[in-house]
Image (cartoon, helix red, strand yellow):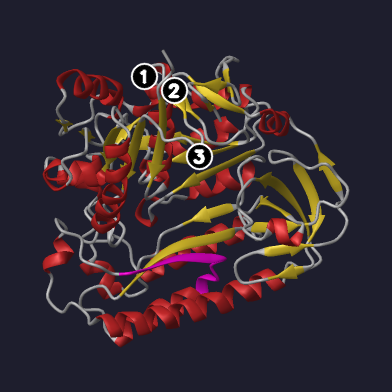
Amino acid sequence: MSTRTYQVRTFGCQMNVHDSERLAGLLEDAGYAPAVDSCVPDVIVLNTCAVRENADNKLYGNLGHLRPTKLANPGMQIAVGGCLAQKDRGQIVSKAPWVDVVFGTHNIGALPVLLERARHNSEAQVEILESLETFPSTLPARRDSAHSGWVSVSVGCNNTCTFCIVPSLRGKEKDRRPGDVLAEVQALVAEGVLEVTLLGQNVNSYGVEFGDRLAFGKLLRACGEIDGLERVRFTSPHPKDFTDDVIAAMAETPNVCHQLHMPLQSGSDRVLKAMRRSYRQARYLSIIDNVRAAMPDAAITTDIIVGFPGETEEDFEETLDVVRAARFSSAFTFQYSKRPGTPAASLPDQLPKEVVQARFDRLIAVQEEVSWTANKALVGKQVEVLVSAGEGRKDADTRRMSGRARDGRLVHFAPGSSAVRPGDVVETVITYGAPHHLVADGELVSHRRTRAGDNHEEGVRPRTSGVGLGLPSFGPPPATSQSSQTAGKPVGGCAVR
């Protein structure tokens, strides 16, 4: 009997990407194998987002395209999970009766059982829980990258932003114990991972649940004690909870990268109040000033929403003023769109599409000018690049490779005659700065082969077991070792990646 294969398709934010790693780990523990591109998987899992515009259309469009494939392949199953599944629940099966399983954000661990039950009963299984059943960290994960890994410090959110549906779909914030976070980081490093990103809807409120408001800064410092961990990043903090002890930890811990993603959303105090963002423009800019005073080389990125209900031209100009003053290295910019179930969806003074589009275009132009100025100033500077795979769409044509500098900027570089692999570390000199990336076309200054590069070359990806909940603790955990998943073996007629 051939091994059943799976494919997970991810939509949305970093939380969804990490959840998909957990879903892959669960399915492999249950005996499934990842399918290759040329084969039709036995199970396709759509891990959905409800935050982005047209999320519903994207899901049902994908399901429509999958229907003929399923009809042509008896026994194939389709599962839908994530935020949109939590929101739409049984409506998904009503609209797309060929879906076999629907599960929510609070019970991703139930997927293998639900698939088996759907097969046995020959009917769709819909299971949506209202609160977290199992903390995701207790579940196994098959990691996508040999060199970089996500590590959740919390799930859920206690904020009440009027434009955001996340709290109703992800629930109240639940914090992991520091010892569990550090144990997972150590497990990844033991597998050759060089970089971790600490992940949460609001990472810098971490610790409130177990009574330590300084816990996140302590966690950053503890990560600095883990041998072999070269880079630590985190996303996303909230300005209302951002404190000087975190800035100090970033500046004083050598492996914590001088990169900060700090959502702004709007530069207008009036709009921030309507959004229920509990900070104002002056507070936001003071944080930026304090970060740059401690780390002059810090690259700061942000999120901005254009066209929130009632936004005036004066409000929008204030946003542009903050963009110029903050000198963001880049910004994720969004046109406001109604999200059903959010307070902002029923606010008066919804703006016409053409007004929102015009302001959006102006914001992009200002931010590109700011980004380009900052990137041109880096020409001639030497940077350290952790080489990645798939980030340079034109790499094959330009004979370059790509990766991230320590400050998070994307660098396209010429490897020359060096046998550079994703996961290796190179040093190079910037020769050109574009608005969205840097180019280094000279000879490499150095090239360090790494275990992560070896693993990528051999098709090995880290596979971490679940880390249970323990007591609060700080400091490096004892060394552990996890087994790796080797790719490339034929399973059920298809090669496993």
Q: Which residues are magenta?
A: 325-335
Classed neighbour count for the residue bearing mark 1: other residues with Cα under 10 Å, few (<14), some (14–19), many (≥20)? some
- Quadrant hosting residue 100: top left
Q: Decide which of tag 3 and tag 2 comes sooner along the chain.
A: 3
Q: Is residue 236 above or below residue 265?
A: above
The residue nearer to you, when weighing 377 against 170, is 170
Amino acid type for the residue under numbered disc 1:
Leu
Identified at 65% across, 34% down, the residue is: 194
Q: Is 71 left, or right, of 433 in this rendering? A: left
Q: Is residue 290 above or below residue 75?
A: below
Pointer 2 and pointer 1: residues touching (CB < 8 Å)?
yes
- Quadrant hosting residue 76: top left
Disc 1 marks which residue? Answer: 469
Amino acid type for the residue under numbered disc 3:
Asp
Q: Is residue 245 visible?
A: no
Indicate the secondary structure of the residue bearing disc 2: helix
Disc 2 marks which residue? Answer: 180
**Which x, y percent locates residue 191?**
62, 23
The residue nearer to you, when weighing 144 against 93, is 93
**Which x, y percent locates residue 429?**
81, 59
